C-alpha cells in the first residue's frame, strides 16, 4: 500500500515526523537517511529503511523506485547557519542539489512532495520586518537562506505539472533528539540548570517552533496533499532574550546568569534576520493544526522528560 517516505530521520524534524506518522497513520512508512535508523525506530516492523545520501541522485532515485511512496516529506538539510556560511559547497550540495534530487525522484514515481524550508529566506530588516506571510517577497541575507530559497524554486519547478508540492517554511525549531545535535532552547535550559552564563540577544525576534507541532503541520500537509506555500511555525513571536526569560520562568530557574547583548556583539560568521518570524494564519486555516504558544511548547519539553 503506498504510504509516506520521510528524509533525514536522524534529525530533529524528521524524527518527530516519523514518530507522528507511527502514531497517527496506518499506512506503510519508509525512511531515507545516510545512517541506519536511530532508536527507537530501529527494528520497527512498520518502517522500511532506505540508506542513501541525498546528494547522490542515483541512490535517491533507486530508493524511491523501491519504496514507491504516495507522499515524500523532506526535512533533511544542513540547518547550521554558520556551517553553511563557512562551507558553501557543502551547503549547496545538501540543501540545493539534495532537494532537487528528492524532487526529481518524487516526480519520477508520482509522489506528492512536502518540502521543508525556513524563515531565513527573509531579511528581517527594519524596513521589511516580520512576521511574514506567504505573499512576502523573499530576500535572504546569509548563504543558508540563499540555499533554501534556491531549493524552494528548484523543487517547485521540478514538480510543476508532474506532482503536487507544498513548501513549508518554519522557524527556530526546538525539541528533543537524543540521536542528533542540540538546539537553542535545549542549550539554554541546560546552561540555566547548571548555573552557567547564558548570553541572550535582545534584537532578534522570531516564532519558536516545537518540532512536534511542526511535524503535525507537515503530516497534515501530506495527508491533505496540500500545494503551494505554507508558513508552519509556532504561534508566538518573541525576542531571544524574552524567550530565555520565559523558559526560565516556566522551569523555575534562576535568571541571574543571563547576560544581554546585541547580535552584532556575537560576531557570528553568518548574518541573522533580526526582525523575523512567520505568520501562520494560512497554515492553521487550511491544514487544521493550531500553532502552539511558548507555554505549550515548554509543556511538551517537560513531558518529554527534559524536566
Image (tube, rainbow, N blue to C red):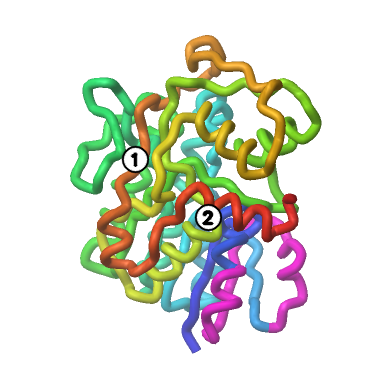
In the displayed structure image, the side of residue 262 where residue 185 appears, left or right: right
Q: Residue at position x 55%, y 41% from top?
A: 78
Considering the numbered disc 1 on the image, is that residue within a helix, a strand or a loop? Answer: helix
Q: Position of residue 211 (x, y in %)?
A: 54, 54
- Classed neighbour count for the residue bearing mark 1: other residues with Cα under 10 Å, few (<14), some (14–19), many (≥20): many
Q: CA distance from mark 1 to mark 2?
A: 30 Å
User: Which disc, if any, is residue 149?
Assistant: 1
In the displayed structure image, the side of residue 9 where residue 55 appears, left or right: left
Q: Position of residue 224 (x, y in %)?
A: 33, 75
In the displayed structure image, the side of residue 26 where residue 288 appears, left or right: left
Q: Residue at position x 67%, y 43% from top?
A: 251
Q: Residue at position x 47%, y 37% from top?
A: 92
Q: Viewer-nearest of labels 1 and 2?
A: 2
Q: Residue at position x 65%, y 63% from top?
A: 51
Q: Is residue 127 magenta?
A: no
Q: Position of residue 261 (x, y in %)?
A: 54, 14
Q: Nearer the viewer, residue 235 or 233?
A: 235
Q: Position of residue 266 (x, y in %)?
A: 56, 14
User: Which disc, if any, is residue 67?
Assistant: none
Q: Is residue 70 above or below residue 9?
A: below
The answer to whether residue 117 of the structure is visible from this angle is no
Q: Is residue 92 above or below residue 123?
A: below
Tell which circle, 1 or 2, labels the residue nearer the N-terminal end: 1
What is the span of residues highlighted in magenta in the rendered image?
19-45
* The residue positioned farthest toward the top in the image shown: 265
Q: Is residue 42 magenta?
A: yes
Q: Nearer the viewer, residue 70 or 292?
A: 292
User: Which disc, if any, is residue 296?
Assistant: 2
Q: Is residue 117 above or below residue 193?
A: below
Amino acid at each position: 500500500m503506498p504510504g509516506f517516505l520521510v528524509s533525514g530521520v536522524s534529525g530533529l524534524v524528521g524524527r518527530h515526523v516519523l514518530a507522528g506518522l507511527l502514531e497517527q497513520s496506518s499506512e506503510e512508512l519508509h525512511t531515507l537517511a545516510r545512517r541506519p535508523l536511530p532508536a527507537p525506530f530501529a527494528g520497527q516492523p512498520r518502517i522500511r529503511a532506505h540508506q542513501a545520501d541525498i546528494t547522490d541522485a542515483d541512490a535517491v532515485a533507486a530508493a524511491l523506485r523501491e519504496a514507491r511512496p504516495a507522499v515524500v516529506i523532506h526535512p533533511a538539510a544542513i540547518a547550521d547557519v554558520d556551517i553553511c556560511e563557512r562551507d558553501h559547497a557543502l551547503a549547496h550540495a545538501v540543501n540545493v542539489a539534495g532537494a532537487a534530487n528528492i524532487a526529481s525522484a518524487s516526480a519520477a514515481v508520482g509522489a506528492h512532495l512536502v518540502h521543508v524550508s525556513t524563515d531565513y529566506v527573509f531579511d528581517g530588516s527594519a524596513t521589511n520586518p516580520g512576521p511574514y506571510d506567504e505573499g512576502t517577497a523573499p530576500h535572504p541575507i546569509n548563504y543558508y537562506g540563499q540555499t533554501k530559497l534556491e531549493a524552494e524554486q528548484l523543487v517547485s519547478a521540478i514538480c510543476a505539472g508532474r506532482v503536487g508540492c507544498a513548501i513549508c517554511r518554519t522557524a527556530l525549531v526546538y525539541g528533543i533528539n537524543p540521536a542528533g545535535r542540540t538546539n537553542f532552547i535545549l542549550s539554554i535550559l541546560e546552561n540555566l540548570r547548571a548555573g552557567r552564563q547564558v548570553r541572550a540577544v535582545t534584537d532578534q525576534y522570531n516564532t519558536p517552533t516545537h518540532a512536534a507541532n511542526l511535524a503535525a503541520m507537515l503530516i497534515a500537509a501530506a495527508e491533505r496533499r496540500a500545494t503551494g506555500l505554507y508558513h508552519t511555525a509556532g504561534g508566538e513571536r518573541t525576542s531571544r532574550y524574552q524567550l530565555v526569560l520565559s523558559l526560565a520562568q516556566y522551569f523555575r530557574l534562576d535568571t541571574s546568569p543571563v547576560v544581554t547583548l546585541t547580535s552584532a556583539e556575537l560576531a557570528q560568521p553568518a548574518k541573522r534576520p533580526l526582525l523575523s518570524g512567520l505568520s501562520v494564519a494560512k497554515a492553521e486555516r487550511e491544514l487544521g493544526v493550531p500553532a502552539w504558544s511558548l507555554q505549550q511548547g515548554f509543556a511538551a519539553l517537560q513531558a518529554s522528560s527534559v524536566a
